[in-house]
Amino acid sequence: VDILKKAEGYHANNTDKYITEMAARKRLKTEKVHDFFVDLSRMSEMAYPGADQQRVREANLRQHFMTNINHPLISARLREHTEMNIDQLLDLAILLESCYEASKVPAHQVNSMTKQADKMNNARISKLTNMVEKLAINHMEQANQQGMTDQMYNDDGGMNPGCSYHYYN
């Protein structure tokens, strides 16, 4: 176990190295918040190994995460939530970043994207409606061929409730 710990950097001589790396580690502009957090967590585990250091590890991870996220607005909002644990803080940071990115899209572009999605959905609905109509016609033709139309319709010309060939408009 000691050999594995040394190979992974879990020995006392390296703790200062990982503490320094954590302090210097800044989130890259293209890096996802989650990936940055995972890397900081790894460094935190190396810098503060052992169960007895868990509170120190989490406090430092929290501090370095908020400080080095490299986005002043997100950092400020994260600092407002002192009651959150580190996992909740990560979720909030991801949410804030996605909201920030979404706010950069101009409103006319969002409206245009919504209209395109509506057109695509309408086309899909139309296609499904046509398929259902064809299936209903096919079933009716099969019923005619099998002489089952008398069972399908009641005396008023409407469909019998027990018939399995219901078609709704």
Image (cartoon, helix red, strand yellow):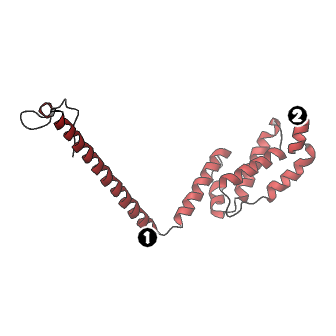
Circle 1 residue: 108
The picture places residue 163, in percent across and down from the top left corner, at 19, 31
Decide: marks 1, 2 in contact (CB < 8 A)? Answer: no
Q: Is residue 36 left or right of residue 164?
A: right
Crowding at mark 2 (Cα within 10 Å: few <14, some 14-19, many 20+): few
Q: Is residue 160 left or right of residue 124?
A: left
Which residue is situated farthest in the front direction here?
A: 145
Earlier residue among tags 1 and 2: 2
Circle 2 residue: 1
Which of the two residues, 94 or 79, is positioned nearer the viewer here? Answer: 94
For the point 68% across and 59% down, which residue is it?
Answer: 31
Q: Eyeballing the image, is 144 above or below 38?
A: above
Which residue is situated farthest in the left direction here?
A: 155
Quarter of the image containing the N terminus?
Answer: top right
Q: Is residue 49 visible?
A: yes
At label 1, which amino acid type do we have?
His
Which residue is situated farthest in the right direction here?
A: 13
Q: Eyeballing the image, is 108 above or below 12?
A: below
Which of the two residues, 117 or 43, is positioned nearer the viewer here? Answer: 117
